[in-house]
Image: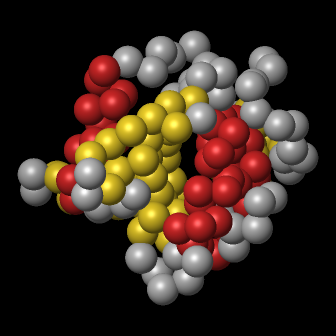
Amino acid sequence: MELSLPKCPLNIKREPNGLYVLDGCRKKWVKFTPEEYVRQTMMEYIISSGINRALVANEQVVEINGMKKRCDAVIYNSRLQPIAIFEFKAPTVALSQKVMDQIFAYNRELPVPILVASNGLQHICISRNEDGISLFPFAELQERLKICAG
């Protein structure tokens, strides 16, 4: 399936039980699902802008109401402060209010200035600061991340 993200090379291998993609941030092979395709493509796009791969945490654990949840991806700055949370869905999954509630729940526990929800076809980019929240165009994402990363 074509995503509305720049094409990037992904390292994919076939195993008897399916396809796997190399997650360069976690340094391990993971099942190549539609959601993982979106995550890997987006993260490679972000890293291509100059964000250090070592500052990207995929499947970052966050505790919400005493329960451990996993943010799909968190980007940190060079001082190891979180600057962005990403929530990924498969291309067939709509970016609904439920998805946005999920990313905002993560944000309550892990305050960051940038929130991104993507199904690979649609991207919702949100800026948070002391004045509130606002949407911004996906085309600005790389530059905003570089500014926050310092």
Residue 121 position, x and y percent, is 65, 21
Work out whether 137 lies above or below 122.
below
Work out whether 102 lies above or below 10.
above
Relative to 42, is 149 on the left or the right? Answer: left
Residue 148 position, x and y percent, is 53, 68
Work out whether 53 lies above or below 66.
below
Residue 57 position, x and y percent, is 53, 64
Residue 92 seen in this snapshot: yes
Q: Name the residue located 45 percent from the left edge and 21 percent from the top edge.
A: 95
Toward which corner of the image does residue 91 lie, by quadrant?
top right
The quarter of the picture where the C terminus appears is bottom right
Q: Name the residue located 48 percent from the left edge and 86 percent from the top edge.
A: 79
Residue 55 position, x and y percent, is 59, 73
Looking at the picture, tell me which residue is in the foreground, 72 or 136. 136
Looking at the picture, tell me which residue is in the foreground, 147 or 54. 147
Q: How was the colour assigned to the protein in this rendering?
A: secondary structure
Q: Give the total of numbered labels.
A: 0
